[in-house]
Image (cartoon, grey):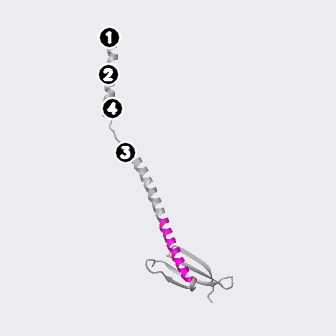
Amino acid sequence: METSFKRNEDRPILLLRARHSSLSTVKGGFTLLEVMISLAIIGGLLVTLIYSLNYHLGIAVRHRTLTVCTALAREKMYFMENTPSAGKGQFSEPYAGFSYETNVKDSAFPGISEISVTVTDGKERIELAELVRKAR
């Protein structure tokens, strides 16, 4: 019985040694597959982020252009209220890329004219119209 008892004592020791030796050979870190999957996820997120940023910057530029066109059309409309006249032209610096067209026509109401101003930068176009009394 002593021999079997010694064998039982030796086994746990051998198992402990085997476990200890297997733990010491495991290296920490990521596998190539894990790194490639994480890079694919990050790449997809970056592409989505850049696309979204580009889209929203385009919207901001368009809104800026529409705001400038509206302000220029209102300014031209203000001057046309006093002296309505048809014509075309370009704005001076810093709005040299913007052009305008003014029109005057009779309205359906007697003694009233319709004046309109169209301002464009080539891509965007704003048109304002207003009814004014005819000059006597």
Instruction: Specify few, some or many for label 1: CA neighbours under 10 Å numbering under 14, 14-19, or 20 or more.
Output: few
State how far apart marks 2 and 4 are (Cα): 15 Å
Q: Residue at x 34, y 24 (%)?
A: 15
Q: Is 44 left or right of 28, judged from the image as shown? A: right
Q: Secondary structure at mark 4?
A: helix
Residue 79: give x, y in percent of width and height.
Answer: 54, 82
Instruction: Return the residue at label 1.
Output: 2
Q: Amino acid at mark 3?
A: Leu
Is there a contact, CB below 8 Å, between mark 3 and mark 2? no
Ranked by sequence position, the earlier of labels 1 and 2 is 1
- Nearest the viewer among 115 and 33 is 115
Q: Residue at x 50, y 79 (%)?
A: 99
Instruction: Return the residue at label 2.
Output: 13
State how far apart marks 3 and 1 are (Cα): 52 Å
Ranked by sequence position, the earlier of labels 4 and 3 is 4
Q: Main SS of the magenta segment? A: helix
Residue 50: give x, y in percent of width and height.
Answer: 44, 59
Ranked by sequence position, the earlier of labels 4 and 1 is 1
Q: Amino acid at mark 2?
A: Ile
Is there a contact, CB below 8 Å, between mark 4 and mark 1? no
Q: In the displayed structure, would residue 59 be above or below residue 20?
A: below
- Tell me which segment is drawn in magenta: 58-80
Instruction: Specify few, some or many for label 3: CA neighbours under 10 Å numbering under 14, 14-19, or 20 or more.
Output: few
Q: Secondary structure at mark 3?
A: helix
- Nearest the viewer among 45 and 136 is 136
User: Going by the picture, which residue comes out furthest to the bottom?
Assistant: 136
State how far apart marks 4 and 1 are (Cα): 32 Å
Instruction: Return the residue at label 3.
Output: 32
